[in-house]
Image: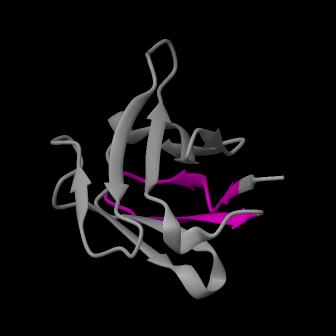
Amino acid sequence: QVQLVESGGGLVQPGGSLRLSCQGSGIIFSTYGMHWYRQAPGKQRELVGTSTPRGGSTNYADSVKGRFTISRDNSKNTAYLQMNNLKPEDTGVYYCSSIGYWGQGTQVTVSS
């Protein structure tokens, strides 16, 4: 059974940083790409960024380029989303996804 579990969300002031984690189980992590999505209140879920299976290539939404970084430690079956210089518009529930499976999400709130 594949499970993805996000953690690391919270409340942060504008300009602050958070690192989200996505712990996978029941999946050979290094075989599959990993995606991070977010959903703001009242908005559709949007793709934040994608990592290739071994992490050699990443792509990001224009809105987070230069501020967010995806990394992964396949030996720990874990992917990360480092978020710097956070803005209020980054507020939302953040999800990781791989091969059609989704985590439960972790809330990120950026507010002063």
* Left or right: where 78 falls relative to 51: right
The picture places residue 14, in percent across and down from the top left corner, at 35, 51
* Left or right: where 19 falls relative to 9: left
Query: In the depicted view, which residue is nearer to us: 6 or 97?
Result: 97
Query: In the depicted view, which residue is nearer to us: 60 or 67?
Result: 60
In this rendering, the count of numbered labels is 0
Give the magenta-colored segment's residue range: 5-25
Query: Compared to 28, does 76 lie above or below?
Result: below
Q: Quadrant of the rendered structure where residue 63 is? A: top left
Residue at 54%, 43% (x, y): give it.
94
Q: Quadrant of the rendered structure where residue 76 is? A: bottom right
Query: Compared to 28, does 59 lie above or below?
Result: above
Verify whether residue 11 appears in magenta: yes
Residue 111 visible to an observer of this rendering: no
Q: Quadrant of the rendered structure where residue 4 is? A: bottom right
The picture places residue 31, in percent across and down from the top left corner, at 51, 68
Residue at 28%, 60% (x, y): give it.
85
Residue at 49%, 12% (x, y): give it.
42
Residue 48 visible to an observer of this rendering: yes
Name the quarter where the C terminus is drawn. top left
The picture places residue 69, in percent across and down from the top left corner, at 31, 66
Residue at 23%, 50% (x, y): give it.
60
